[in-house]
Image (spheres, coloured by chain):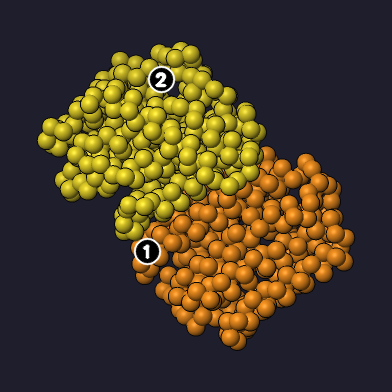
Chain colours: A yellow, B orange
């Protein structure tokens, strides 16, 4: 199965799993609609696909894989809802649709984010086919990746970075935390469900770190080279806000070189897994070549 | 040990545990300060004290009790930070001090809340003296109590209730979710750490539900009868905002009757525990008689 086939197979299943997880909640209608709206707004589902691809490359299948994948997408989606708020990035468009607070108001948007974050831990705690030890491992890793020492900390650095010129090192630290931590967690979660050996785990973490940086560099490049229509969000926003970016710090050609460097490092990392890596290689190419 | 002595003993320990849990994080300074600010702003620590009191009444001690207590206070504190935001209750004062967003700005306040919520699950996952099975149980119960089917759902109902007159039944549902769920979880967490028997668990849950409602009725009564100085927040806010409250729906004397009813039910529930309930009885009295 190549990556297109793999995604065509799994994306509807991820969508369905997310819809079912929300549908089963007995909660106020506005809250349910708000959670559902942002989860179903689509996007590339890169984190769930990464988890499922790692599991596949390890030659494993797992009856709870879609639930774990859904729990990661909930965390990612909550972070987008909160990042888009007026007091943060103040974005009106996300994935080509009005942002959550534009549709449901700020209060419900904040609470929908809180609810998705909280629920994702509950989904992990209630998995049916994972030992308590492994549930605790997943929850521990997720709380670090998504929390103050990971994604939330990265968002704080990102906001503070808007007011000053960051060094390349500082910019990388923002991205490692803001985007990289949850991408790497997605890979680790797949490795845990797939009973990866320690050396496979190390290779996969290295892979995750490099594609995380590649992902963000491409994000910055797209903000310069893409159109709002392609991106489904406002293009050129970084430059108009004088935000530190890879193209801004390095020039566009040098940023593209750095993108290639991290893509190559990612490919080299997974090459030790012994050939069963075609999906991860294609995913790397997808991240580098994506237009949105 | 009576309740005053119990609180005098434990409150500094809870304070210290919270400070240590935040201190050990390697995170941006503004985020750390913001999390620390609201955790240290004091308050009655009713949830941690409930957990510790239940454990004590069960004749048990537990080396991780303070950590679990701290994780609950983190959830409670995150909910206060988010509830106080301009798009929610828009409060400038909390516990007599400027609210988090007044000091750190809305963006950091939202993220500090997100970080505290996320961290609380991590603290539970990393307990040293609790089995993985019990960690999963605590995390499962917490995610329900704090999430869309609990506290967050209650906050949505509370906001939506501001725009219409609620029935008494609807008002109780708001409070069961918004305040009651986390209070009951605090009690359950103590019961789990204290290896409570099934019949003790049932009695304690019933106790929790009644003191939860008593707590909220007293909150509504204090908003009518208290001063801003006593409360450490703006008094008379419910009436000026035409919010549904117990005194508003029932009259003040009837609200006080209802408060007594739930306090008596709470006392009756714990009476089956067989005498080891003086702290829980005193806690009930404290909730009924508190001035803030």
**Residue A227, image x, y percentages:** 46, 12
Please identify the quarter of the rendering in which residue A188 is found.
top left
In the image, A47 versus B35, the foreground residue is A47
A284 lies left or right of A139: left
Does residue B226 appear anywhere in the picture? no
**Residue B240, image x, y percentages:** 84, 48
Q: Residues within 10 Å of mark 2 (few under 14, many from 20)?
A: some
Question: Which residue is label 2 attached to?
Answer: A292
Above-or-below relation of B263 to B157: below
Q: Which mark is residue A66?
A: none
Chain letter belonging to callout 1 = B
Residue at 30% x, 36% y is A52
Does residue B238 appear anywhere in the picture? yes
In the image, A6 versus B51, the foreground residue is A6
Q: Secondary structure at mark 2?
A: loop
Question: Which residue is label 1 attached to?
Answer: B133
Residue at 40% x, 34% y is A14
Q: CA distance from mark 2 to mark 1?
A: 42 Å
In the image, B104 versus B56, the foreground residue is B56
Q: Residues within 10 Å of mark 1 (few under 14, many from 20)?
A: some
Q: Quadrant of the N terminus of chain A?
A: top left
Say whether mark 1 and mark 2 are on the same chain: no
Above-or-below relation of A248 to B119: above
B161 lies left or right of A229: right
Callout in the foreground (2, 1): 1
Residue at 35% x, 22% y is A218
């Amino acid at each position: 199965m190549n990556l297109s086939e793999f995604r065509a197979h799994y994306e509807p299943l991820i969508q369905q799993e997310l819809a079912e997880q929300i549908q089963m909640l007995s909660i106020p209608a506005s809250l349910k609609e708000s959670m559902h709206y942002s989860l179903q707004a689509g996007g590339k589902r890169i984190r769930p696909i990464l988890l499922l691809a790692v599991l596949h490359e390890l030659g494993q299948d797992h009856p709870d894989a879609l639930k774990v994948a859904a729990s990661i997408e909930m965390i990612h989606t909550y972070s987008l809802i909160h990042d888009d708020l007026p007091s943060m990035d103040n974005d009106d468009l996300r994935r080509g649709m009005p942002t959550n607070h534009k549709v449901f108001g700020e209060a419900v948007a904040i609470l929908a984010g809180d609810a998705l974050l909280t629920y994702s831990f509950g989904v992990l705690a209630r998995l049916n086919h994972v030992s308590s030890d492994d549930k605790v491992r997943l929850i521990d890793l997720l709380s670090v990746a998504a929390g103050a020492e990971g994604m939330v900390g990265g968002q704080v650095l990102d906001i503070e970075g808007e007011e000053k010129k960051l060094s390349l090192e500082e910019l990388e630290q923002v991205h490692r935390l803001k985007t990289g931590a949850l991408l790497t967690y997605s890979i680790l979660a797949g490795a845990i469900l797939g009973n990866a050996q320690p050396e496979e785990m190390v290779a996969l973490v290295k892979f995750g770190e490099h594609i995380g940086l590649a992902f963000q560099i491409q994000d910055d490049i797209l903000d310069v080279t893409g159109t709002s229509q392609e991106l489904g969000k406002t293009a050129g926003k970084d430059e108009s806000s004088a935000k530190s970016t890879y193209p801004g710090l390095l020039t566009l050609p040098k940023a593209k070189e750095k993108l290639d460097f991290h893509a190559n490092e990612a490919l080299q990392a997974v090459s030790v897994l012994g050939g069963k890596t075609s999906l991860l290689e294609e995913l790397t190419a997808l991240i580098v070549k994506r237009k949105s």
